[in-house]
């Protein structure tokens, strides 16, 4: 095995290659672990290479080698397996297996072939085997499909997923997998959210002071281990057995290394997970995202998303998987301060998986494009320093010689991104917010209740291409023409004109206040596309 997890310090880890170390290097047991099963591994020298090897070879060891290093044909989803979820319904707990969305074309092909999957124990002569036909009634093309599970494999074995023969089986396996992680003898840990939680896969990590669910056979939590703060909150009743569900957190700090080491040792030995000082993750900064169980829904496709990178490592790494591609991309990480690091990547119509510090981990963050309609807030006003007024929903370019004073019906949050990608935030007070020292190529975003209501580019001052006096004469000549209700598009153009044409303000303000405009001008400004006014 070429890859392992290196526990270089208490509460810290990073993914390393055997080739990173000098031949003959010696390390104490426990410094390296298998990313797949969580068991200890050690460095061993071969004739032409250095590899990691398990201390004790088991029947699953070859599978670890296959999934950790991966064959060229294995996708990230095949390697990490299908996720298990603890679901809550009317206060009751249920166990489900999550099947990732599949395209409508694959779903149609599978349905036409009569394709199916079988979920079973990875144990000989098991009676736990369930068949599910793949069709539009059973599986979703735009959301995760949750299949109820009423058994847990014995002896710490994995769930096995087998596919029927056919053209669709190969494609389905790339998106799903042929296995799902099982339970250890001490149970399993799940993340905690309003939906329930997702199972922490063997070999993955958790952090202190965060809530988790612990599903176990015993009716009590071990009392001889300090730092386990959990309470019984329900039961998980399966076909042949009953489990108890506890909720709480693991309290530990590196300031008490002895207690941290004891708790981390217990979790590693019995739960096969690693306790870290700081859980690696990314936090979206911009644009606004909707938090879902496994990640975020993003409404802007084809645009960059900015995220903060959280890691306990001095030099974190980020791995981005596009759809079901095999190899990840490593984005540039910008260090904006001693604590903050930022990455950006483009959102496409395909789902994106982002892992921090480790290529293969089940606790990564998913980003998925979801079309949503954002409601604009009406009557939002921008007051520019020289007393020029314009509608905030219509001003999309601001000159650098201006200072802005926002007057809003409700308090808003303003996010400012400079040309180097640095992000700053500010909030309005009593509906008023001022922005000064505008810089060229800055971008300003205004959010109300986490919803985007306005954005603008900061540009250098431009000289108008049309003579102000000529415009004044044109408006004066048509001022007594028959008027029509002002179209929304024309209103936006007039608001922009207020900035550049000072002599014509008298007429422009009159149009805005009365919400009417001479029909001839309406046609010039937008009513007739062939005679549209060009600014």
Image (spheres, grey):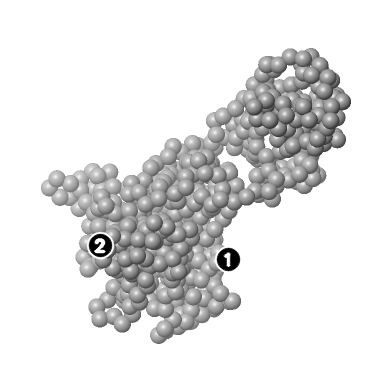
- Label 2: how many residues lie within 10 Å, few (<14), some (14-19) or many (20+)? few
Answer left or right for 240 relative to 34: right
Disc 1: CA contacts within 10 A as few (<14), some (14-19) or many (>=20): few
SS label for mark 2: helix
Residue 66 in the image, given as x and y percentages of width and height: 25, 57
- Nearer to us in this view, 465 or 520: 520
Q: Nearer the viewer, residue 88 or 217?
A: 88
Q: Position of residue 526 (x, y in %)?
A: 70, 31
Which residue is tagged 2? Answer: 63
Q: CA distance from mark 2 to mark 1?
A: 34 Å
Please tell me in which quadrant of the rendered image residue 498 appears. top right
The residue that disc 1 covers is 194
- Tell me which numbered mark, 2 or 1, is placed earlier along the sequence: 2
> Quick check: 277 left or right of 535?
left
Q: Which residue shows up at 86% across the image and 35% down it?
A: 514
Q: Position of residue 320 (x, y in %)?
A: 41, 46
**Circle 2/circle 1 CB separation < 8 Å:** no
Label 1 residue SS: loop
Residue visible at 37% across and 66% down in the picture: 111
Please give the name of the residue rendered at 73% of the width and 32% of the height, measured from the top-left corner.
490
Q: Quadrant of the C terminus?
A: top right
Is residue 321 shown to the viewer in this render?
A: yes
129 vs 339: above or below:
below
> In the displayed structure, would residue 249 be above or below residue 432?
below
Query: Which residue reaches farthest bottom?
Result: 240
- Identity of the residue drawn at 85% across and 24% down: 479
Estimate the x, y position of residue 14 in percent, counting from the top left.
37, 50
Question: Can residue 259 be seen in the rendering of this structure?
Answer: no
Number of the label disc, if any, that sits on residue 164: none
Note whether 102 is above or below 491 in the view shown.
below
Give the quadrant of the N terminus. Answer: bottom left
447 on left or right of 152 = right
């Amino acid at each position: 095995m070429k890859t392992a997890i290196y526990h270089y310090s208490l509460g810290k880890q990073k993914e390393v290659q055997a080739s990173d170390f000098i031949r003959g290097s010696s390390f104490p047991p426990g410094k390296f672990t298998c990313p797949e099963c969580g068991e200890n591994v050690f460095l061993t020298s071969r004739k032409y290479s250095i590899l990691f090897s398990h201390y004790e070879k088991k029947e699953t060891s070859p599978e670890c080698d296959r999934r950790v290093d991966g064959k060229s044909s294995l996708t990230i989803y095949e390697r990490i397996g299908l996720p298990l979820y603890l679901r809550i319904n009317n206060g009751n707990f249920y166990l489900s297996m999550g099947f990732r969305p599949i395209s409508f074309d694959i779903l149609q092909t599978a349905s036409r072939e009569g394709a199916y999957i079988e979920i079973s124990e990875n144990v000989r002569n098991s009676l736990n085997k369930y068949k599910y036909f793949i069709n539009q009634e059973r599986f979703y093309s735009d959301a995760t499909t949750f299949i109820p599970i009423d058994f847990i494999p014995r002896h710490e074995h994995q769930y096995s997923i087998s596919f029927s023969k056919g053209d669709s089986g190969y494609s389905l396996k790339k998106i799903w997998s042929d296995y799902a992680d099982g339970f250890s003898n001490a149970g399993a840990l799940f993340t905690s959210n309003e939906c329930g939680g997702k199972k922490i896969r063997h070999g993955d990590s958790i952090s202190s002071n965060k809530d988790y669910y612990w599903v176990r056979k015993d009716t009590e939590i071990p009392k001889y281990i300090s730092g386990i703060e959990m309470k019984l909150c329900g039961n998980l009743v399966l076909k042949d057995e009953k489990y108890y569900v506890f909720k709480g957190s693991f309290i530990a700090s590196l300031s008490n290394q002895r207690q941290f080491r004891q708790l981390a040792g217990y979790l590693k030995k019995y739960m096969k997970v690693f306790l870290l000082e700081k859980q690696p993750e990314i936090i979206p900064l911009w644009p606004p995202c909707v938090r879902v169980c496994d990640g975020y829904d993003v409404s802007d496709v084809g645009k960059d998303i900015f995220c903060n990178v959280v890691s306990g490592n001095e030099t974190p790494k980020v791995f981005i998987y596009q759809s079901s591609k095999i190899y990840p991309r490593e984005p540039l990480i910008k260090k904006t301060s001693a604590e903050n690091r930022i990455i950006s990547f483009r959102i496409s119509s395909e789902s994106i998986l982002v892992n921090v510090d480790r290529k293969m981990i089940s606790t990564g963050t998913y980003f998925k494009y979801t079309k949503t309609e954002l409601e604009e807030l009406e009557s939002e006003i921008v007051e520019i320093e020289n007393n020029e007024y314009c509608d905030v929903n219509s001003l999309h370019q601001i000159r650098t010689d201006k200072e802005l004073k926002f007057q809003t019906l409700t308090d808003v949050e303003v996010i400012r991104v400079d040309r180097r990608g640095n992000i700053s935030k500010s909030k309005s007070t009593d509906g008023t917010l001022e922005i000064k020292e505008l810089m060229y190529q800055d971008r300003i975003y205004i959010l109300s209740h986490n919803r985007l209501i306005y954005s603008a580019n900061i540009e250098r001052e431009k000289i108008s291409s049309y003579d102000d006096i000529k415009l004044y004469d044109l408006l004066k000549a048509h001022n007594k023409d028959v008027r029509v209700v002002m179209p929304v598009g024309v209103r936006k153009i007039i608001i922009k004109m207020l900035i550049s044409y000072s002599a014509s303000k008298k007429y422009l303000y009159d149009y805005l206040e009365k919400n009417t405009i001479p029909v001839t001008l309406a046609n010039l400004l937008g009513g007739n596309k062939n005679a549209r006014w060009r600014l």
